[in-house]
Image (cartoon, helix red, strand yellow):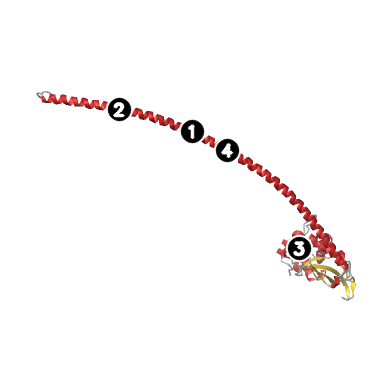
Amino acid sequence: MEVLPKDIIRTWILPHMPQSTRGRPSRVDPVELLEALLYKLKTGCQWRYLPVKQIFTGATLTWQGVYARFNTWRKDGSWKAMWLNVLKANKHLLDCSSVQLDGSHTPAKNGGAAVGYQARQKARTTTALFLADNQGQPLACATPQAGNHHDSYHLAALFEELCVLLEVAGIAVAGLFLNADRAFDTTELRQACVEELKVACQEQEQQAAALAVKVDDYHISAVAREGKLREEMKLQAEQVRNEGLQQRAELRREMTDLVLKLTERLAHIDKTMALVEERTKVLTEASKEQDSRNKWADRILARLDGSDGAIR
């Protein structure tokens, strides 16, 4: 019996409905309560024939309780605010290339507010003006009027009410193509369209002027930020340059110290080599002298061996 899946009701409708903060929390599932209201609005059944037993699975309400909740939300504007919020969140799905204006009569045999006898229907009715997009999706509904009035009754005021609802839903009125039958082709509606267009154009001009001021402020702010950024970059460049100069100077000092150390080591090596050469010469002379001595000793020994053989 569901009109809409419960997930859709929970996601799109329930967050926009007021939650009572006084008294004990209600045991009734708010999603099922909204499901009951949508069933009533979809089928048009009488309140007393609302199938509450089939709709509510846990704690239940009578049809009087469901009506009381709906009547409270209707009077405080919560139901209308919910519709406008849902419409605003899904306006990208609408086809507003052409907006349809028409009225609808609803029989009110039991009477009530804004009820009058309508000869064509041969019954007491209530009439209301509706705006729909080019796909037939209802957008806004004006305050109901008694059915004995012509469709053009209070047309300017009702049309302005419809335009206000569209603007609240975030749908721009300026530039909309309005399609209506000849019952609405009155000087009053044409003048109302012109006035709405003027108001919309003025609002757009004001928005454009405000946007221009914001753009100018942003430009000034951007120029200031750019100047500040340039100064910061200049300071950073100077800092990097100074650090580079310092590092280069330190590197030069380190290289100079290294060259001096290498020079000292080379000088030490030269001295060592000179000392080695000097010692080599000494050793060479000593070796020559030792060789000459050895030769002299060999000659002595040879002479001794060659004399009488006593000494060997």
Residue 112 in which image quadrant: bottom right
Extreme residue in the left direction: 308
Inspect this view and state whether residue 214 appears: yes
Residue occupied by mark 4: 243
Find the distance from the CA under tag 2 to the CA under tag 4. 56 Å
Of the pair 144 and 251, the residue shown nearer to us: 251
Residue occupied by mark 1: 256
The amino acid sitting under disc 1 is Thr
Find the distance from the CA under tag 1 to the CA under tag 4. 20 Å
Q: Residues within 10 Å of mark 4 (few under 14, many from 20)?
A: few
Of the pair 266 and 154, the residue shown nearer to us: 266
Please tell me the numbered disc located at residue 281: 2
Find the distance from the CA under tag 3 to the CA under tag 4. 62 Å
Of the pair 227 and 2, the residue shown nearer to us: 227
Inspect this view and state whether residue 312 appears: no
Q: Earlier in the sequence, mark 1 or mark 2?
A: 1
Find the distance from the CA under tag 2 to the CA under tag 3. 113 Å
- For the point 54% across and 37% down, the residue is 247
Q: Residues within 10 Å of mark 3 (few under 14, many from 20)?
A: many
